Amino acid sequence: MRNLIIQIFSKINSFVSVTITFLTSVFGIQGGLFAAYLILNVIDYITGIIKAKKKKTESSKEGVKGILKKVCYWFIIVTTFIISYILIEICNKFNINIEFVMFFGWFTLGCLSINETRSIIENLIEIGINVPNFLVKGLEITEKKFTKIVDENIEKENEKVNK
């Protein structure tokens, strides 16, 4: 069991190192945001393992599903940044301004970061850790405000298109 944990940790460590290096080279200073999200992924996974051990519901199958879920979140983030870039570049060729599309990736990263944090808090609560209520409520409010701002910006762009 100990060797398995060391192997998993080694693979996670390698993945984190390569990912942070890649993101920093591509996004420069913004790479820190991606690194922070990656750290949230790891913390969520670890707190999930602790929760499963405490509840005696450990399952390697569930662990793999958790890792695949995290990898798919990264696919979503990468895809939204790529599609934003493609659409902006194509529309620029035709003098069509859709700069708001560049926020798709950032909005996705923001929403997924909030979800990861909420998952960590839920895991900690189920483990028996006393998590301050303001943190739970604050994340809920932040998610609502974040979504509202994006919805308002999309609506403004929609109005511009319909004029």
Image (tube, helix red, strand yellow):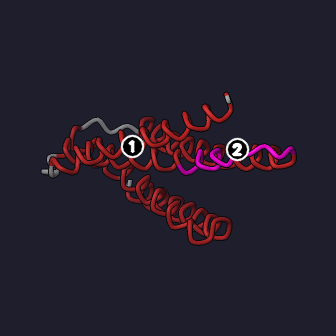
Residue 139 image point, x, y percent: 30, 47
Rendered image quadrant of residue 23? bottom right
**Which residue is depicted at the point 51% across and 67% down?**
32
Numbered circle sitting on residue 98: 2
Q: Which residue is mark 1?
A: 115
Number of numbered callouts drawn? 2
For marks 2 and 1 on the same chain, the one whose residue lies earlier in the sequence: 2
Task: Please say whether residue 104 is one of the residues in the magenta stretch.
Answer: yes
Q: Nearer the viewer, mark 2 or mark 1?
A: 2
**Residues drawn in magenta:** 94-106
Residue 15 image point, x, y percent: 57, 60
Secondary structure under tag 1 reads helix
Q: CA distance from mark 2 to mark 1?
A: 27 Å
* Left or right, 64 with reference to 57: right
Q: Quadrant of the C terminus?
A: top right
Which amino acid type corresponds to the residue marked 2 in the rendered image? Ile
Which amino acid type corresponds to the residue marked 1 in the rendered image? Asn
* Left or right, 80 with reference to 86: left
- Please name whichever residue, 54 or 16, is drawn nearer the observer in this view of the structure: 16
Residue 140 image point, x, y percent: 29, 41
**Which residue is depicted at the point 29% across and 35% down?**
57
Which residue, as the protein is rendered here, is positioned at the far front? Answer: 163
